[in-house]
Image (spheres, rainbow, N blue to C red):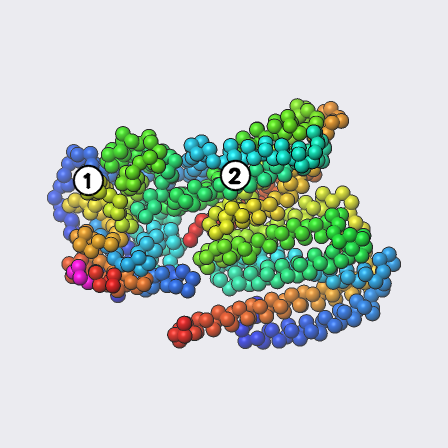
Amino acid sequence: MSAHIPAPSRSLAASPPEASPPAAVAGRSAPVRASRKPPGMWATVAALLRKELLVELRTLESVPGMSLFAVTTFVVFHFALNQNTVSGDEAAGILWVTLLFAAMLGVNRLFVADQDQGGFDAFLLAPVDRSAMLLAKALALLAYLAVLELIAVPAFGLLLLAPPLGQTLPDLLVVLVLADMGIAAIGTLVAALAVQTRARDLLGPLLALPLLVPVVIGAARASSPLLVLAHPAGVGGVPIRWLATLALYDLVFGLIAYAVFDFLLED
Amino acid sequence: MAEIEGEPVLQLEGLARHYGEREALSDVSLSLHAGQTLVVFGPNGAGKTTLLRILATLLRPHAGGVRVLGSSLPDEAWAVRGRVGLLGHEPLLYRELTARENLLFHARLHGVGEERVEELLAAVALSNRADEPLKTLSRGMVQRVAVARATLHDPELLLLDEPWANLDPAARELVEPLIGAGGEGERRTRVISSHDPSGGLREADLVLGLRDGRAALLRGAGDVDRGEIEELYR
Amino acid sequence: MSPTNGRGLRTLSIATIAAIPIALALVFFYAPIEAEEGFLQKIFYLHVPLAIVTLCGFVLGGLMAIMHLRTRDRRWDLRSYVAIHMSLIFGVGTLITGSIWARGSWGHWWVWSEPTLVSFLIIMLLYATYQPLRFAIEDPERQARYASVFAIVAGAFVPMNFLAVRLSSSYLHPRVLGSSSNLPPKMAFTFLVSLAAMALLFATLCSYELTAKRTRMLLKARSRILGFQ
């Protein structure tokens, strides 16, 4: 049953001059309509990222918690292992497990503000490419991880690591970057999946941890030779196969995340 | 010149959407032309919000034809986004950010200039509190910012879900130029969901009464009286 | 996969019921007893086909999920769900038989040195979240969509995980999946028949489950129309 009523006829009477501000604003404002230009992908990502970082700076919900967790975990490890220093495989293991679990805290928080405060809707109403949200969130998570590591790695060097970090830092940095990219890609995807479910805090890590096992393998094996006492000076340091594994993982899951992310947002 | 050539702003035919086994909306058909206001009445759960969200492209129609501003949903939803404005139950604003930051964020997402943000802050009389986090503002003020957000990009179709819910009479007057019907020659096309029979009727050109997702009532506003609308809620 | 009229089902069932005894006969009477491990080695004919079928099932689940997202036809989601569900069950079987084999060969119920087993554990831990994920989402349409996303990511994860674990395993046990190419002909033949039987079993069980689910849905829909609800 469809009703049709004629539209009100528009008189040719001149519309009142746009003297008072409210009228000017509420008026058709041909300038606004004509001049609004949907932002391109990078402009959208930039706008989103800016908002992300602004909210994080205001609430400090993720980064301080993640960093504190990491440092506390190192202390716990000291008591749990009953050791003053670690090196080699052990050191790599402790470092990466801690970083991974700290990352999970950040992953859990990633979409919560959007979910609770209607941020998804606001974004979905905009004439923008939806993958921009994936990129922006992954970049934000990457930023949080970077700050986390800036605090956690020196703390690790101070509290638990036997050999000095200095020389191997550049190589370690490469490993950190590659691993972080994998964590960011999977973390963002899993966060988006989990946030709309009932047991979101539990499901996030349960999904992410198995998926990140290859990252742990690659990162730990790659870092292990960098964290040894008898470190031969100037050696290439890291066997290429681990860096290649990490890079392959980042590529594959980065692409997959990009391909499926839209389906998580729409309704 | 008399209007009406060209397509209606809204053209719905047999629109349906289900939620699991329940029909949230079923067989809704209507047309709405430019400059007209459709007011949707109905008890909670009748499908008013679902209808608005479909028109906003936030939900996909599961059956039936939906054409908004000349594009069919869901396939051409991208052409519609950015041309509709939604004012829902949630303000869609971040509580930790200020009014200005929130509006700037939306402006960037819609490709609208920053001056427009200032314009609207002035229009809702919040320029002097634009730099305080939203969580420190009253509900009425947040609603005003939400109105600003919804009209920032000067949408061709306004979708308002109980827009006057948190506004006192003074605030209502304030936002009238933004979401009201508009003056002669400048009439806005709106879809409003309302719980207020007399107030809603006043605004309407076309009335839709929903019950359990079905159109129990669909008539020009002139042909409907209060009593019929109140019937819907029984 | 199979229509509700059950025609394809009968063929599959018959084929499976025929194949299993044949495979068993081959395993016990035809295949030679392996020199090193003795009789216990025969569990290889159960464990490895279970493993292969499980993994293929997971990957298939991912492919069906892709079809679901592309066509938005919920039947693909149903197929994907059944495939993954069945693979989970077969996967548990893989882990159990693997554990028995490990106990028999190396004296421990669990060994980290067998990369296949280790990869399996990780994959099972991942897919174990599939059903909790589904049940944590109420909206059926969204549930199907999210489950498909998961199935695709997890399906891509399967090969990736194998690669990573293989690489990290410092000593590859001689008796590994790839060794099927080095099998003497009698063993190879037995293996292939076992694999075929296992695949048939998987397909049949999936078809049964699909048919049962579809019938139940049809019944519900009809009873609703007739007003029984």
Question: Magenta stretch: residue A239 in it?
Answer: no
Q: Position of residue B213 (x, y in %)?
A: 32, 62
Kindly indicate the quadrant of the structure image that contains residue C43.
bottom right
Neighbourhood count class around disc 2 (C-alpha, 10 Å): few under 14, some 14–19, many 20 upward: many
Q: Amino acid at mark 1?
A: Ala
Q: Quadrant of the N terminus of chain C?
A: bottom right
Magenta-highlighted residues: B224-228
Asked if both marks, 2 and 1, belong to the same chain, the answer given is: no
Q: Residue at x 57, y 48 (%)?
A: A206
Q: Secondary structure at mark 2?
A: helix
Residue of label 1:
B170
Give me the C-alpha separation between circle 2 and circle 1: 43 Å
Q: Residue at x 39, y 61 (%)?
A: B18
Q: Quadrant of the C terminus of chain C?
A: bottom left
Q: What chain is tagged by disc 1?
A: B
**Is residue B186 something that shows in the picture?**
no
Q: What chain is tagged by disc 2?
A: A
Instruction: Name the residue nearer the viewer: A98 or C140.
Output: A98
Q: Secondary structure at mark 1?
A: helix
The image's mark for residue A106 is: 2
Query: Compared with residue B14, is residue B77 higher up or lower down, i.e. above or below?
Result: above
Q: Position of residue A204 (x, y in %)?
A: 54, 46
Neighbourhood count class around disc 1 (C-alpha, 10 Å): few under 14, some 14–19, many 20 upward: few
Residue A55 lies left or right of residue A237; in this view the side is left
Q: Residue at x 68, y 24 (%)?
A: A164
Instruction: Name the residue nearer the viewer: C171 or C191.
Output: C171
Q: Residue furthest right?
A: C35
Q: Residue furthest left?
A: A13
